[in-house]
Image: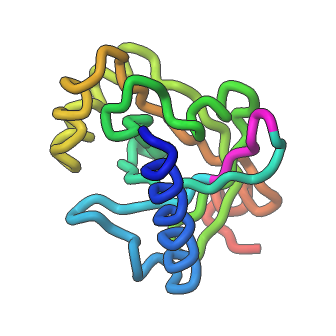
Amino acid sequence: MSGLSDALVRALGRVNVALYRRSGGRVFGRVGRAPILLLTTKGRRSDAPRTAPLLYLRDGERLAVVASFGGHPSHPAWYLNLAANPDVEVEIDRERFAARARTATPEERERLWPKLVEMYGPYASYQRKTSREIPVVLLEREPGPNWRLAQEGRAA
């Protein structure tokens, strides 16, 4: 991407995040049928929080997101940040929680990819457009103070 398009994408991303948060996910919370979450990583060089709006698919207790970058030849920055620090924050509507991110195994990706393409068709063209295999990332909620009570069906 050129410097101008990079700046435009970053600016639109910031607007998307701000409107999503202000509306609790009612604005910019979906693309068609695909729901959107906000993923906050820690910058691998800056150590600053970096938030990206991403489509997601529920996979049992986990969430699957795609590091497509629109089929760009390189991985998106948020994915590179995960290599340095897999501890992330996930925001869905008004709920925020800590999670651990990891790249799906080849078997998990093979199982999830068709479901992700069904949810958001352009993923297939993104994969055809690039020589890299587009990673699927799994987000697993970290146990918090009320996690055990929630697992037992009791509120705090």
Q: Position of residue 16 (x, y in %)?
A: 48, 70
Q: Position of residue 98 (x, y in %)?
A: 71, 52
Q: What count of labels does the image hold?
A: 0
**80 or 109: nearer the eye?**
80
Residue stretch in magenta: 40-45
Q: Position of residue 137 (x, y in %)?
A: 48, 33
Q: Residue at the bottom extreme?
A: 23
Q: Is residue 13 left or right of residue 108?
A: right
Task: Kindly indicate the quadrant of the structure image that contains residue 82.
Answer: top right
Indicate the quadrant containing the N terminus: top left, top right, bottom left or bottom right: top left
- Magenta span contains residue 42: yes
Residue drawn at (51%, 79%) of the image:
19
- Magenta span contains residue 97: no
**3 or 151: nearer the eye?**
3
**102 or 54: nearer the eye?**
54
Q: Is residue 114 left or right of residue 12?
A: left
The colour style of the image is: rainbow
Q: Is residue 134 left or right of residue 141?
A: left
Residue drawn at (38%, 53%) of the image:
55
Q: Position of residue 90 (x, y in %)?
A: 61, 56
Residue drawn at (42%, 44%) of the image:
60
**21 or 8: nearer the eye?**
8
Residue drawn at (61%, 36%) of the image:
101
